[in-house]
Structure formats: C-alpha cells, structure tokens
Image: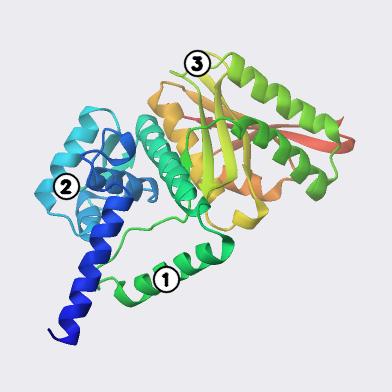
Amino acid sequence: MTRLDRRVDAVRRFTRFYTQHIGVLHRHLLESPFSLTEARVLYELAHHETTSAKELAGELGLDAGYLSRILKRFEKHGLVERRRSAADGRAADITLTPAGLQAFAEINARSRAEVSAMLARLDDGEQTAVVQAMATVEKHLGGGHGPERQPRKVPYILRPPQPGDMGWIVHRHGVLYAEEYGWDDTFEALVAKIVAHFIEAYDPKRERCWIAEKDGEVVGSAFVVRDSESVAKLRLVYVEPAARGLGIGQRLVAEAIRFSRLHGYKKLTLWTNDILVSARRIYEAAGFTLVKEEKHHSFGKDLVGQHWDLELG
C-alpha cells in the first residue's frame, strides 16, 4: 500500500467517524423534518439578503433539478417566497418567509446546542486543539469560488425571538442609550413597557419581531406593531456597536417594510429623535418622510422628537 493509499484510508475513516458523530446518517437532521441538504439550503437562504435558484445551486454545488424540488417543497409549506428579480426579469429572487426563518432558527439552535454539548466534554486545551485542527482541514481543502458572481452573503442571520431575547433587548437599549447619549433609566422603562405590551398583546398575523444574530450573539432587533387596521409602527430598531457597518440596520428596516406591505398595511410610521443621525439616514434612504417635529424633555435630556411616515399603498 502506498503512502497516498494510507492517507486516503485515513481521510475516509475520519469521514465515517465524523458523519456518524454529528448524526448526518440519520434520515432527518437534528430531529427536524429536514434532510442535511434541505437544512443547508435553509442555512444559505438565511445568510443571504436575497438570491436566485441559479446562484444557490452554484454556491452549494447542487443539481438544479434537485434544488428546484427542494424549493418547491419549501414554497408549498410556506417557508420561502419568490419575487420577480428587479435585476433580471427572467429570474426570481428567493427569500425566507417568517415561517422559514423560524424553521431555520430552530435547527440553528439545536445545532449549536449539540456542538456545545460535544465540546463541553473536553477541557479548554482539547477544545482549542479540535477547533485548530478543523481550521487546518478547512484551510487546505477549502478552495476559492469560481469567476462567476456570487450572491451577497451576510455574516449574520435574522430570526424570530427566542426565550431571553426580549429581556436582552430591554437591557441593551438601556445600556447603549446611556453610554452613547446619556439617557437616564426612564428610557429603559419605556422600552420595557413597549416589549411587555408586544408580548402580552401579540398578533402573529399582523405583528413581527426580528432578532439579528451574529456568531451566536444578539446584535440587533426591530419590531412591527399594529397601530390601526391600516397603519403599523416600526419600533425598537437597534444594532450593537460591534456589528455596525454590516448593513444590519438597513436589512431590519427593509424586512419591516416588506412585512408591512405583505400584511395589508397602507402606512408604516415611526418616532425617533434628531440626535439619532445614523438611524435617520436609514429611514430616509428607505423612503420615509419626516412629517412632524417637536421639542420635548425626556430621558433626562432636552430632545427634538421626529415622526416619520412611509406610504405603502
């Protein structure tokens, strides 16, 4: 047996060990209704703002017909939606629906829990060795992309809220606005009231919360809440300082607008303050119009409140 033959056997032995260890040989991944391939398609869709079937097939190396059947199944179960591409009228942009985001969030949480349990059996040095060994394999076997354009992949996901997220949103609003603007704890109290009302009066047909997650950490949020039959409010849009510059704020606002349109609202409105310059730029770029300003003393500061509207009809 040659040296190469022995190395081939070693790689195949490791592959058998690892696929069995992480449960890939089971019919469904992580006790979900999805196969490994289907879960990977969900993962890629969650990490793209939008993509097409052609781009997705190229990135995953999947047969176009096989991918088409997966996407049709997803569409049948309300996990994805297709819209005619603005860039190419012959193609369709594919995005996850709220149900699709929820399905991905559940798989993602189970996967993190399973890997966490696997690593927890090792001490710190052993964990480091395993991660470094995996990085070495990825470095040497990973290859670059071909010359064709790849869809824009974002280093974060948007998902529905999970237990503990709402408390975290209140906490981070209180901390960040105190650090960045000197606002007092009455602002944190206001955020707590907004979150509590959202939870207690939640209307799943007409309201939504998005959580931005990066590397397993919450890095942003946005809420759409019902104000009237025809008007929705955009509330509690925030992005962690370490995650700014990735387009998370713009994506959260875009999802809120898309949701509001799809669910029959004629107008999306919001209230902010003029010192929140970066947020105001996002709203203006998304098409919101400043309709009213008023001076007020809140959160321990003299402020100028602003009301912005976006017509959706």
- Badge 1 density bin: few <14, some 14–19, many ≥20, Cα 10 Å: few
Secondary structure beneath disc 2? helix
Q: Residue at x 31, y 34 (%)?
A: 32
**What number is the disc on residue 188?**
none
| Nearer to me, 47 or 115 | 115
**Residue at numbered disc 2:** 67
Q: Secondary structure at mark 3?
A: loop
Front position among marks 1 and 3: 1
The residue most toward the bottom is 2
Between the C-alphas of marks 1 and 2, the distance is: 32 Å
**Mark 1 residue type:** Ala
Quadrant assignment, res 60 = bottom left
Disc 3 to disc 2, how far (Cα)?
34 Å
Local SS, label 1: helix
The vertical placement of 27 against 1, above or below, is above
Q: Earlier in the sequence, mark 1 or mark 2?
A: 2
- Quarter of image, res 123: bottom right
Q: Residue at x 29, y 74 (%)?
A: 141
Viewer-nearest residue: 183 or 6: 6
Which one is in front in this view, the residue at disc 1 or the one at disc 2? 1
Q: Residue at x 12, y 47 (%)?
A: 66
Residue visible at 49% across and 69% down in the picture: 129
Q: Nearer the viewer, mark 3 or mark 2?
A: 2
What residue did someone put label 1 on?
133
Sequence-wise, which precedes: disc 1 or disc 3? Answer: 1
Q: Are marks 3 and 2 in contact (CB under 8 Å)?
A: no
On the image, the x and y values in percent for residue 40 come to: 29, 49
What residue is disc 3 on?
203
